[in-house]
Every structure is written in C-alpha cells, then in structure tokens.
Image (cartoon, helix red, strand yellow):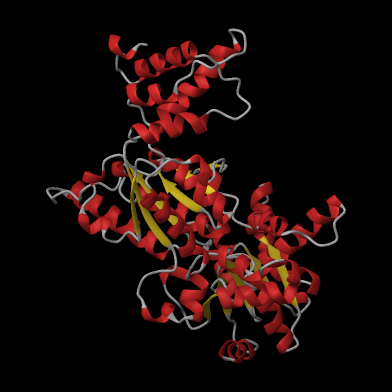
C-alpha cells in the first residue's frame, strides 16, 4: 500500500522506482499491477537484448522516453543494473529520467542506488525469492489435478529454490518432455529436468559441471562414513519439515543450507561421494577450480566468490571445492597487509557459505591445515581413510564391470594384500588393464593387471619390490 500511495503521488512529482531481485519474482508484474491500479499505461523496454546485439541502448532510451511521454505512459527499463555496469548511468540520461513527469520503473537483479544514496524521488524495493511455503503454493497452483496426484510437489519445492516464473517454466518444460514421448502426464524425472533447465546457466563459466556417475554400491568406506553421507542427504530432503513445519527455522541461527568438509588422501573417494550425493538428491554438481578463484589482487578473490555463489543460488547447485586447503588453510598471523587480507578472504568465504541455501562441500588432502575455528562451523566433517586390505579387495572386485572378460588367474585377495593403493589408483589400474587386454586378445588376465599396477606405481613415484611379484 505504501508503494501504491507513492505511485499515486508520482503523478504530480517525478518518481523513479528500482525493483531488484532474481528473475521470475514478479518485478515487471508488480510494475504493471501498480500502473493498472491507477489506470496508467505501462511501456516496457528490455535493455539486455540490446546489450547482447551491441545496440546503443543509451541512444534508444531517450526515444523510449519520448514515446512513453506521447502515449502518457509509465516506463519500465528491464536489465538496468546490467546495462549501466559499475560506471553508473550517464549524467545526461539520468537527468532525462528524473525529469520525466510520470513513474519510471528500473528493473534489475542487484541492489543499486544513484550516487550511492537515495533521494526523495527514488525508491528501491527488493523482491526476494519465495520461501518454501510460497514455492509449494506456486507448484500446487500451476499443476493440474492429475499432475499433483502423480508427483510430490513438496519434494520439488524443497530441492529447487525457483521463483514463480521459473516454476511455471519448469512445468511447461516437463509437459513438453512428456508430450514428445506421447505421455499425457509428466513423470517426476521430467519435472526434475524442467527445474534444472530453469536454473542459472552462467555457472559453467565459473566452475566445471560434473555428471554424477556413481551410486551407493560404487563407494567403499567404513559404515559410519556411509551413514554420514546418507545423513547429509536427509538434511536436505527433510529441511522443509524441520525448519518450516516444526519451527526450527525461527529458533536456530544456522542457515538452511549445508556445509561439509571431506578430508582424506587423494583418491580415497571424496569426489565420488559428492557425485553420489548429487545423484541421490537429483541436483547438479559443480567442481570449483581454485586457480580461477584465488587472486593476488586485493578484492578479486571476493569478487570471484561472489559470482560463484550468486550463480549457484540461481542454479540450485552443489558446490564442490576440491583441494580446499589451498584457500582455507590455517589463518596466518597478521604480519603484513597481505596476511590481514588473506584472513578477510576466509571470513568472506565462510559468510557466503553460511548464507547459501544449497550444499557446499570442501575437500582437502590435509585436514591438519584447517584450523578449529573453521572446522567447527561445518555441519559435517567426513574423514576418508586410506583403504585397508579388505576394502581394497572390495574396490578391486566392484570396479571390474560384470560383463568384463576376466581370466581365472586373477586373485583379488592377493592384489589387495600386496599393493597398498587408494581407490583412485585401483580404478586407474583396472581401466589400464582392460585396454592392455583389449590389445592382446580380449581376455583380462593377471599379467595385464600387474602391468597396469606397475604403471600406476611409476606414476606415484614408487617401485614394485621383487617380493610383490607373484
């Protein structure tokens, strides 16, 4: 009502409204509804396509102002913050906007204000993404009766933090997928695919997308570690019940997301575990390349992290930071400005992780490099131990596919007892032995496996002792 009142006042005094928030939250719809409230036409100009085609949007905007003036309309400029960038609007253009006698709606995604502060004729209004209750209401309102009976809207509302517009787009996409198969009602998989399509698309430019290939049967870990991973999935699967229905969201200071640390030697299954969680929850997984994040220039690391977390929030993705000790090591003593800034970077990262509503997984080979103040803020800390002989035997057995032509002389027990290798090394040796056998008649024999193990030892900088050969 306050905005409507301000809009009415704008009929006699020029007023600029800045509506900002993610796509699909109803920024333009609100502008149209407010104009309709007082019987004022609204003319809209989308600046982003102009930027994509290289058109001179600053030259076209005054023309739009003239057309709006002739038609006695309010004017909406979409993509405002993207168009002006960090330099702000040219003074001449801003003067023309502030002099316009009717309301102007600037629509963007990030907070912005002219010259860093508000003026009497500038109102900034934030449009926040819908919470779980609102998302569920949007899903149920836009689904047909048949669709509501065949799927679980609660699961979709919980896992995908979509806006109203994105939910409508996800439903339309799912229906098209079903129609192409000749089905009348989409499956849950169709709605998952449609929801992922509506997520942010710029994250692949900042991180590497990993297609989950593994399930629970593919990982070999102590049972307690497996239970920890399943508990992580349950934390996401049932967070709407705990935070919303049971009221814990009002009682605890912790965020709605999940922060986990995977610690253990290289090749012990940290990346595989992240893939299993992504597969189990039906979410996308992105691996962050720290070389593209950490910068020697002041402020650049935070800028890179901000871009990653902003896009991840739109894509509902799991973020997997590999070799995280390179960035999240023990906080150094403050001896100079660089040390002080390194600590600021870590604090900034922790804050963004806690604010993120998705899953953030940090993987490190050296847990001792992480200080207690850092690990204490993690929701889960999962240790990935070096596999013992029994675990190595299981890894050897499950890594060979059932259809692989194995010779009778392969002794998994002997391999596990005599070669102390991680799961990653074993998988490399299994694949190498298959190629050796394919080039040597088609049967995977012990000699092929031993040759592959020898090559793997060479890669690790180790020699196979004579007693290790059968």
Q: Quadrant of residue 67?
A: bottom right
Q: How many marks?
A: 0
Decide: is 53 above or below 143.
above
Residue 264 placement (x, y as % from top left): 32, 41
Which residue occupies the foreground of this view, 204 or 219?
A: 219
Q: Is residue 191 visible?
A: yes
Q: Quadrant of residue 160?
A: bottom right
The residue that appears at 49% across and 70% down in the rendered structure is 239
Decide: is 424 above or below 286.
above
Q: Is residue 357 visible?
A: no
Residue 455 placement (x, y as % from top left): 41, 14
Which residue occupies the foreground of this view, 171 or 289?
A: 171
- The quadrant the N terminus occupies is bottom right
Residue 122 placement (x, y as % from top left): 52, 78
Q: Is 216 positioned to the left or the right of 168 in the image?
A: left
Q: Is 334 positioned to the left or the right of 416 in the image?
A: left
Which residue is the extreme one toward the right? 182
- The quadrant the C terminus occupies is top left
Decide: is 151 above or below 338.
below
Which residue occupies the foreground of this view, 447 or 364?
A: 447
The residue that appears at 44% across and 64% down in the rendered structure is 257
Residue 137 placement (x, y as % from top left): 65, 77
The residue that appears at 27% across and 56% down in the rendered structure is 375
Which residue occupies the foreground of this view, 228 or 403?
A: 403
């Amino acid at each position: 009502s306050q905005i409507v009142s301000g809009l009415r006042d704008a009929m006699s005094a020029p007023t600029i409204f800045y509506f900002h928030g993610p796509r699909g939250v109803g920024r333009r719809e609100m502008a149209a509804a407010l104009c309709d409230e007082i019987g004022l036409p609204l003319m809209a100009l989308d600046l982003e396509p102009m930027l994509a085609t290289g058109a001179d949007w600053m030259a076209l905007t005054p023309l739009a102002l003239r057309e709006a003036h002739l038609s006695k309309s309010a004017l909406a400029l979409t993509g405002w913050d993207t168009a002006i960038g960090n330099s702000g609007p040219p003074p001449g253009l801003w003067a023309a906007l502030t002099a316009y006698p009717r309301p102007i709606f600037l629509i963007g995604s990030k907070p912005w204000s002219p010259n860093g502060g508000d003026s009497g004729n500038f109102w900034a209004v934030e449009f926040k993404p819908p919470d779980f209750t609102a998302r569920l209401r949007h899903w149920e309102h836009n689904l047909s009766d048949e669709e509501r009976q065949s799927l679980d809207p609660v699961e979709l509302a919980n896992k995908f933090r979509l806006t109203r517009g994105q939910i409508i787009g996800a439903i339309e996409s799912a229906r098209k997928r079903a129609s192409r198969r000749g089905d009348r009602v989409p499956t849950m998989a169709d709605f998952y695919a449609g929801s992922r399509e509506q997520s942010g698309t710029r994250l692949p430019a900042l991180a590497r997308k990993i297609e989950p290939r593994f399930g629970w049967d593919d990982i070999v870990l102590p049972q307690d570690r497996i239970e920890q991973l399943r508990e992580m999935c349950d934390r996401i699967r049932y967070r709407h019940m705990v935070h919303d229905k049971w009221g814990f969201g009002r009682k605890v200071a912790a965020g709605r997301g999940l922060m986990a640390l995977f610690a253990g030697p290289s090749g012990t299954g940290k990346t595989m575990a992240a893939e299993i969680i992504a597969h189990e929850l039906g979410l996308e997984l992105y691996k962050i390349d720290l070389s593209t994040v950490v910068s020697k220039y002041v402020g650049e690391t935070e800028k890179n992290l901000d871009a990653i977390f902003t896009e991840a929030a739109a894509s509902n993705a799991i973020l997997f930071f590999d070799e995280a000790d390179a960035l999240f090591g023990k906080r150094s003593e403050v001896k100079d400005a660089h040390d002080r800034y390194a600590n600021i970077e870590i604090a900034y990262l922790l804050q963004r992780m806690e604010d993120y509503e998705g899953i953030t997984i940090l993987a490190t080979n050296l847990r001792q490099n992480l200080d207690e103040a850092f690990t204490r803020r993690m929701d889960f800390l999962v240790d990935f131990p070096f596999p013992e002989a029994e675990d190595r035997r299981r890894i050897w057995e499950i890594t060979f596919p059932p259809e692989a032509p194995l010779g009778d002389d392969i002794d998994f027990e002997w391999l596990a007892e005599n070669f102390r290798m991680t799961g990653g090394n074993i998988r490399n040796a299994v694949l190498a032995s298959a190629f050796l056998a394919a080039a040597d008649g088609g049967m995977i024999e012990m000699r092929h496996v031993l040759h592959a193990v020898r090559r793997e030892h060479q890669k690790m900088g180790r020699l196979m002792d004579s007693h290790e050969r059968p």
